[in-house]
Amino acid sequence: MDIFWIGLGGGVGALARYIIGKAFNSSSIPWGTFIVNVLGSFLLGLMVGVNIDNRSYAFLGIGILGGFTTFSTFHVELLTIWKDQKKSAIFYLFLTYITGICSAIVGLWITAS
């Protein structure tokens, strides 16, 4: 049954990622991908912090956030930017990793309070 919930959540997350990507990926920096990855890191930090049950984690963490966040798209976009705008690519790389890690920490911190 977990497979069903993971698949359903993955579809929901992928659709949300697509909508946000279309809305925000119009500049040289793909802000839509940045937003979904940082928001996903934050929400996953919250989930880990509240120690949700396995079935909920399967649907929300693996399914929705797994479909929502996108490590592979981030790297393809990063390499595309690198071709023409190396400084922008370096900025995007560090901004995404640092903000993503900090967002996950904030999510954990909020649940520890």
Image (tube, rainbow, N blue to C red):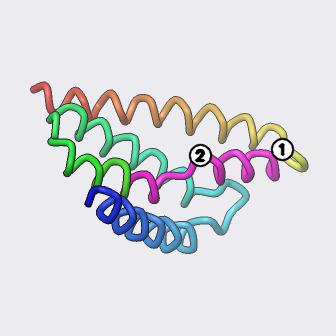
Residue 104 location (% of width, % of height): 35, 33
Q: Quadrant of residue 11?
A: bottom left
Residue 50 location (% of width, % of height): 14, 35
Q: Quadrant of the C terminus?
A: top left
How many tags in the picture? 2
Nearer the observer, disc 1 or disc 2? 2
Residue that label 2 marks: 71
Q: Quadrant of the N terminus?
A: bottom left
Q: Residue furthest right?
A: 83
- Residue 82's tag is 1
* Neighbours of disc 1 within 10 Å: few (<14), some (14-19), many (20+): some
First in sequence, mark 1 or 2: give its number.
2
Is the magenta region chiefly helix, strand or loop?
helix
- Residue 95's tag is none
* Residue 74 within the magenta-colored segment of the rendering: yes
Residue 100 is left or right of residue 92, and the answer is left
Residue at screen point 67% across, 54% down: 29
Residue 38 location (% of width, % of height): 44, 45
Residue at screen point 38% across, 69% down: 12
**Magenta stretch in the rendered image:** 64-81
Residue 79 is left or right of residue 29, and the answer is right
Secondary structure beneath dot 1 equals helix
**Compared with residue 54, is residue 51 higher up or lower down, i.e. above or below?**
above
> What's the amino acid at mark 1?
Trp
Secondary structure beneath dot 2 equals helix
Q: Residue furthest front?
A: 1
